[in-house]
C-alpha cells in the first residue's frame, strides 16, 4: 500500500473497513485533519509553474542541480523481482515490468522518471494517474502538481484527489487511482515541501547579483567621474578642455568622465567595476542552492576546481546521498500503488533500481570490497601471530560481535612430526561416558551436516535481504533528519526467524523421529513428530525472542558507533548516512552468513532434541564433533561425550550445534 493507505490503516481505516469509516466520518476526526478542512482540497501557497518560470528557466544553478539529479535518476533501469528458493529473480514478462519500461504510449521509463524527479525537486510532490482498465492499471501518467490536490477527510485522512484537467473540468480521483510521492512538510502532512522553496532566497540573491553584473558591464547608466575646472570658461574652451581630459583619462573606454565648470576637484559619480564585483556572491549562492538540492557544488563547476579525482568522488556522493534514496522512494511508492491490483505482497515481490551498470555505484562497491578484503587479511595475520581474535577484530575495524574464546591467544601449531596431546575437559554431568578413539563421524551425521548446509544456503539470502533493507531504511531516515532506530523493526526479524525455525524443525524433526523409531528396543515409541507440540512452540518462542533482541541490539550498537565516528570526524548527515549504507552492505555478506549458520544450527539441535523427547522412551545423547579444521578445541575435546537426555554436556550446552558457527551435532539412542 502507498503512504496514504498506510497512514489510513494506522488511523484505523483499512480498505475492508470502508463502511465503518463512513459511519464515523462526522463524529471521529482524524489526527491531522481539522473540521474546516474536511472534504476540501488542500490549498498550497507554492506554485510549480512559478518555480519553473522563476527558478528552472532563469537560474543556471537551479537548472544544473535539477538536471544532474534527474539525468541520474532516468539512467537507472527499474525491475520487478519475485522471491524464489534461490533468491530474488527478475520477472521480465510481468505486466508491471511492461508498465515500468513504458508507462504510457508517449513516455518511456527515462521520460517518466525525469518528470517525476523535476516535480519532486521543484514542487515537492510527484503524482501519477493510474489509468485502470478491467481492474488493472494499463498506463501511468505524470500529473502536473498545480492541477491536482488531495481532498482532506476527517475519517479517511484523504478521501480522493481533485484534478483540474482544464479551466472548466474537474475530476475526482479515487485514492487508488493516484500514486503520490512527497518531501514531507511538517506543517502540512497531505502535501509536500519543495526544496526550491527553501532555496528561494538564495535564488533571488543570485538573480540580483547577475543583474548587477550586467549593469556594471553597461556602466550602470552613469559616468564614473565628475571633473570640476578652476574657473568659468567660454563654451569653446569648455569643449576643448573636456575633449583633452577625456582623451587623457579614458582613452577609448566607454566609461566617460563628465567635465564640469567650477572649483578644481574630481568627484566619483558611480562605483567602479571592482566595487560592483558580485562573482563571489554568486559563488556563495551556487553552493547554497546546490546544498538544498543535495548536489555537491563541484558538479556544477568547470575549470581548475573540477578535476577528475574530486569530480568522481562528488559523483559517488551524489548517488549515495541523493539519487539512491530518491529511487528507493520511487520504487516503494510504485509497490504500494501497483501491487494491490495484482494481489502481490512485498514479502514475495519487490520493485527495485538496477545499479549493475552504474559506474559510480560499481566503483563504490569495489572500494568497499577492497577495504573489507584488506581488513580480513590484517585480521588473519594478527590472529596467526597470536593476537586474541576479539582484540584483532577491534584493531583492524571489523564489526564482529564477541567471538567465543576470542579473548585468548590462538594456540601455536604443533611442530612437524610432534604428537599433539590434547587435555580433555572435566566431565560435569552425572553418568558421563567419553568415547576413547575418535574416528570419522557416522554416515547419518554426515548426511545431517549436508542437510544443514542446504538450509543455511536457503536462509542466507533472506537474512541478507532484511539486513540490507533495514540498513538502507535507517540510512535514509538519518539522511532526512528522522529517527533511524524504528527502522530496525523487531517484528520483521520475529516473522522471519519464526518461519525459519518452524520450517527447519518440522523437516529435521520428522527425519530425526523416523531415525530413532528404527532403533527403538523398548515399547512405547511410535507415532509421528508434532511440530506444534508444547515443547517445540515453547522453545521457538523463547529462542526467537532472545535472538530478535540480540540481533537488533547488535545492529543498533554498531550503527551508533558508526554515527558517533562520523560526528566526531565532522561529517555531514549525508556522509554519515553513507557510512550506514556501507556497513549494511558488509552485514549482508558476512553477518548474514553468520546469523544463518547460527540460527539454522540451533533449529537443527532443537529438532533432534524434541524428536527424542516425543519418542517416549528413555534416551541418552552423545556429542559428535565434526573434527575438521574449523572445530573449536573445546568442542573437539567433547567428542563422544554421552549424558542422559535431561542432563547438560560438560560445557553447559543441552544440544549441539552450540554457539556461533558451530557444526557439531548431537546423536540420540535409547538407554540400554
Image (cartoon, rainbow, N blue to C red):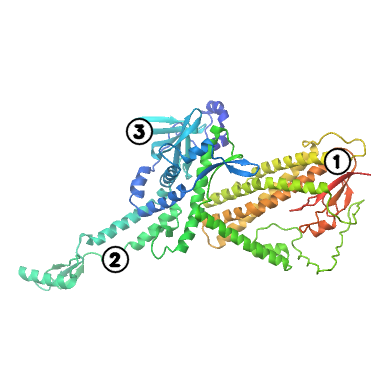
Q: Residue at x 58, y 58 (%)?
A: 368
Report the residue at 20% width, 59% height from top: 221
Counting other residues with Cα less than 10 Å from the Cα at mark 2, is it few (<14), some (14-19), or many (20 or more)?
few
On residue 516, which mark appears?
Answer: 1
Comparing 564 with 67, the one in front is 67
Query: Which mark's residue is nearer the viewer, 1 or 3?
Result: 1
Residue 269 in picture, x, y percent from top left: 21, 65
Badge 3 marks a residue whose secondary structure is strand
Q: Residues within 10 Å of mark 1 (few under 14, many from 20)?
A: some
Depicted 53 relative to depicted 411: above or below: above
Pick whichever of labels 2 and 1 is earlier in the sequence: 2
Quadrant including the N terminus: top right
Judging by the rendered image, the residue that carries numbered circle 2 is 275
Locate the C terminus and report the quarter of the image it occupies.
Answer: top right
> How far apart, in angstroms, are the residues tagged by discs 2 and 1?
95 Å
| Residue 385 horizontal/vertical position (percent) | 72, 68
Say what secondary structure mark 2 lies in: loop
Estimate the x, y position of residue 498 in percent, counting from the top left. Answer: 70, 41
Which residue was labeled with disc 3?
A: 166
Q: CA distance from mark 1 to mark 3?
A: 77 Å
| Quarter where residue 395 is shown | bottom right
Dot 1 lies on which element?
helix
Q: Earlier in the sequence, mark 2 or mark 3?
A: 3
Amino acid at each position: 500500500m502507498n503512504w496514504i493507505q498506510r497512514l489510513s490503516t494506522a488511523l484505523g481505516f483499512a480498505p475492508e473497513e470502508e463502511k465503518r469509516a463512513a459511519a464515523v466520518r462526522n463524529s471521529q476526526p482524524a489526527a491531522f485533519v481539522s473540521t474546516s478542512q474536511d472534504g476540501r482540497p488542500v490549498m498550497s501557497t507554492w506554485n510549480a509553474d512559478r518555480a519553473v518560470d522563476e527558478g528552472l528557466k532563469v537560474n543556471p544553478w537551479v537548472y544544473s542541480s535539477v538536471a544532474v539529479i534527474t539525468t541520474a535518476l532516468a539512467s537507472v533501469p527499474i525491475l520487478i523481482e519475485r522471491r524464489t528458493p534461490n533468491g530474488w529473480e527478475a520477472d521480465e514478462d510481468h505486466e508491471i515490468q511492461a508498465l515500468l519500461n513504458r508507462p504510457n504510449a508517449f513516455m518511456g521509463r527515462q521520460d517518466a522518471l525525469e518528470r517525476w524527479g523535476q516535480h519532486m525537486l521543484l514542487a515537492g510532490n510527484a503524482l501519477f494517474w493510474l489509468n485502470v482498465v478491467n481492474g488493472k492499471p494499463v498506463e501511468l501518467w505524470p500529473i502536473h502538481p498545480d492541477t491536482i490536490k488531495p481532498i482532506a477527510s476527517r475519517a479517511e485522512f484523504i478521501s480522493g484527489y481533485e484534478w483540474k484537467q482544464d479551466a472548466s473540468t474537474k475530476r475526482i480521483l479515487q485514492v487508488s487511482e493516484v500514486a503520490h510521492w512527497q518531501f514531507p512538510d511538517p506543517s502540512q502532512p497531505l502535501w509536500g515541501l519543495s526544496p526550491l522553496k527553501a532555496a528561494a532566497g538564495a535564488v533571488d540573491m543570485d538573480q540580483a547579483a547577475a543583474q548587477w553584473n550586467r549593469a556594471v558591464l553597461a556602466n550602470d547608466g552613469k559616468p564614473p567621474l565628475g571633473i570640476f575646472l578652476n574657473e568659468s570658461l567660454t563654451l569653446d574652451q569648455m569643449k576643448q578642455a573636456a575633449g583633452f581630459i577625456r582623451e587623457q583619462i579614458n582613452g577609448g573606454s566607454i566609461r566617460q568622465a563628465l567635465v564640469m565648470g567650477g572649483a578644481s576637484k574630481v568627484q566619483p559619480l558611480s562605483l567602479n567595476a571592482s566595487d560592483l564585483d558580485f562573482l563571489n556572491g554568486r559563488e556563495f549562492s551556487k553552493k547554497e542552492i546546490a546544498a538544498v538540492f543535495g548536489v555537491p557544488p563541484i558538479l556544477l563547476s568547470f575549470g581548475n576546481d573540477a578535476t577528475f579525482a574530486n569530480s568522481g568522488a562528488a559523483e559517488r556522493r551524489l548517488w549515495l546521498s541523493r539519487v539512491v534514496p530518491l529511487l528507493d522512494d520511487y520504487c516503494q511508492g510504485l509497490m504500494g500503488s501497483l501491487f494491490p491490483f495484482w494481489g502481490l505482497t512485498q514479502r514475495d515481490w519487490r520493485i527495485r533500481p538496477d545499479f549493475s551498470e552504474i559506474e559510480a555505484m560499481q566503483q563504490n562497491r569495489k572500494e568497499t570490497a577492497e577495504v573489507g578484503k584488506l581488513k580480513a587479511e590484517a585480521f588473519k595475520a594478527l590472529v596467526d601471530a597470536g593476537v586474541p581474535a576479539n582484540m584483532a577484530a577491534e584493531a583492524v575495524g571489523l564489526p564482529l560481535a564477541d567471538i567465543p574464546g576470542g579473548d585468548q591467544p590462538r594456540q601455536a601449531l604443533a611442530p612437524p612430526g610432534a604428537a599433539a596431546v590434547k587435555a580433555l575437559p572435566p566431565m560435569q554431568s552425572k553418568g558421563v561416558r567419553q568415547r576413547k578413539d575418535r574416528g570419522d563421524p557416522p554416515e547419518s551425521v554426515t548426511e545431517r551436516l549436508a542437510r544443514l548446509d542446504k538450509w543455511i544456503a536457503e536462509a542466507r539470502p533472506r537474512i541478507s535481504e532484511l539486513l540490507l533493507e533495514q540498513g538502507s531504511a535507517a540510512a535514509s531516515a538519518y539522511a532526512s533528519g528522522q529517527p533511524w532506530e524504528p527502522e530496525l523493526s523487531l517484528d520483521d526479524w520475529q516473522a522471519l526467524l519464526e518461519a525459519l525455525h518452524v520450517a527447519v524443525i518440522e523437516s529435521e524433526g520428522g527425519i530425526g523421529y523416523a531415525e530413532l523409531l528404527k532403533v527403538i528396543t523398548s515399547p512405547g515409541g511410535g507415532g509421528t513428530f508434532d511440530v506444534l507440540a508444547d515443547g517445540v512452540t515453547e522453545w521457538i518462542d523463547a529462542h526467537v525472542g532472545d535472538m530478535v533482541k540480540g540481533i537488533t541490539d547488535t545492529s543498533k550498537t554498531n550503527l551508533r558507533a558508526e554515527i558517533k565516528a562520523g560526528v566526531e570526524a565532522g561529517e555531514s548527515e549525508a556522509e554519515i548516512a553513507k557510512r550506514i549504507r556501507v556497513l549494511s552492505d558488509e552485514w549482508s555478506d558476512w553477518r548474514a552468513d553468520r546469523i544463518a549458520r547460527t540460527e539454522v544450527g540451533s533449529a537443527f539441535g532443537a529438532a533432534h532434541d524434541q524428536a527424542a523427547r516425543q519418542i517416549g522412551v528413555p534416551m541418552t545423547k552423545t556429542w559428535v564433533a565434526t573434527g575438521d579444521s574449523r572445530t573449536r578445541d573445546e568442542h573437539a575435546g567433547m567428542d563422544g561425550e554421552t549424558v542422559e537426555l535431561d542432563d547438560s554436556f560438560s560445557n553447559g550446552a543441552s544440544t549441539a550445534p552450540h554457539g556461533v558457527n558451530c557444526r557439531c551435532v548431537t546423536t540420540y539412542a535409547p538407554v540400554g
